[in-house]
Amino acid sequence: MMPLWTAVALRDATGGAMPVPFDAVGVSIDTRTLRPGDLFVALVGERDGHAHVADALARGAAGAMVHRVEGSPDGAPLLVVDDTLRGLTALGQAGRARFGGRLVAVTGSVGKTTTKDMLRTALAAFGTVHAAQASYNNHWGVPLTLALLPPGSDFCVAEIGMNHAGEIAPLARLAGPHVAAVTAVASAHIGNLGSMEAIADEKASIREGLVPGGVLVLPADSPFFGAMAHGAEVRSFGRTGDARLLSWGDRVRARVGGREVAFALAAPGEHMASNAVAVLAVCDALGLDPARAAAALEGWVPGAGRGQQRRTGGVVLLDESYNASSASVRAALGVLAGMPGRRVAVLGDMLELGAVGRAEHEGLADAVAGGVDVLYACGPLMRHLFDRVPAGLRGGHAADSAALAPVVARAVRPGDAVLVKGSLGSRMRLVVERLEGLQPQFAGERV
């Protein structure tokens, strides 16, 4: 296998010392997913990667990037730098510099990982695509994505996220996109940024990384469109805009570049259709055929916890357990409202909302009352929603997802449609796993 990084390239990119030269076929920050031949980067965060260097080498790592050699095996192949995070960032910068294809960067309050994955699928119809793994969108995720970028790829898709003001622009400048897309502006992280206007400004700062002649793709229906639409050539998407969503349901219909396209999508709901139309807007901005991109999107499948819909134990499970904001919960509840059977919503706390947390949760009461037959909830914030909905909808509340999971598993019955959603920190995956453990006989003949 050809190396992704030669010893010379590693030294040149990072300025590090390499007493024992080695090439690397990949880059990893986690011994659990490391492949033989990878460069292991010993990042320091909640855990110190230096404590895992010996394990990484035992698992077949070609070498390790470290800023502390103590504890590493004698004679180990090491790339010694001043700081491993800065070293990884420098490696990402070098990976971007040698890349000859076109790069798309995606941010947004909701839908960015789904849109990134849709872009991976759509762009594959036009060439080879490298995209961020999972939700690698932060101060180490973006550099890692670029460090793993094969220089001969035709396209790269980088996801860029944030928790606080000032985080997006530096990552966008590192990525250097030809097209940058903002999926949506919603109240996620409002507890850290303080206002919707500040959130919109932070999302729009992705334009600061655009290469000369780059294009900014924005949601036309956002009330912040005007505030965001400057500093670059702008394309728009939504119910209005350059890429227009005409209808959704069994098939999505859209008009892009003066042409109408129709295609099936593996996840229902206007929010998913909107993400898909954003992808078509990006492809159009790249000069690619939107109809060909739309056809490719029929091969997309949602990621775990991001709108997967499947049958388990006699119920239809809508797994939205990976994350939640007010906008995405409303969108998921809208999907649930259109599903057959008894509609069961299982909701965990939406986090990082600060002082508006209670109001954001209580504000979902109308959406629950309009499309849910029974609500189960967990967490102190969801308690406010639970107490606000009509008494006849209240199935049960628990302190956390671990306590709620068995309650829900006992309460659901064959034919139910069950939505599970909450912020990642609410650990709603525990509810999903409990439902996935329901035995087939639970369903009788009604699967």
Image (tube, grey):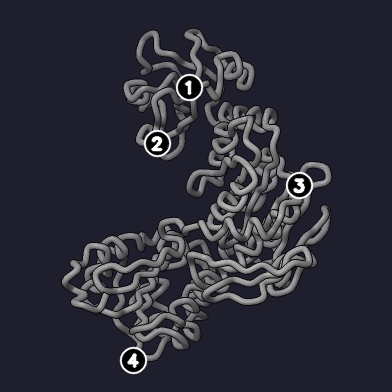
Q: Earlier in the sequence, mark 1 or mark 4?
A: 1
Between residue 422 and residue 211, name the one nearer to us. 211
In the structure shown, which secondary structural element does the residue marked by tag 3 occupy? helix
Check disc 3 and give the amino acid type.
Glu
Tell whether 357 sits left or right of 376: right
Task: Write down the residue under mark 2.
Answer: 47
Check disc 2 and give the amino acid type.
Arg
Task: Write down the residue under mark 1.
Answer: 1
Q: Earlier in the sequence, mark 3 or mark 1?
A: 1
Task: Write down the residue under mark 4.
Answer: 392
Please give the name of the residue rendered at 46% of the width and 16% of the height, measured from the top-left corner. Answer: 78
Give the farthest residue toward the left: 441
Which image quadrant for residue 115? bottom right
Q: Earlier in the sequence, mark 2 or mark 3?
A: 2
Residue 72 at x, y percent in the picture: 38, 17
Task: Write down the residue under mark 3.
Answer: 208
How far is the residue under mark 2 from the one under mark 1? Answer: 31 Å
How far is the residue under mark 2 from the one under mark 3? Answer: 32 Å
Q: Nearer the viewer, mark 4 or mark 2?
A: 4
Q: Residues within 10 Å of mark 4 (few under 14, many from 20)?
A: few
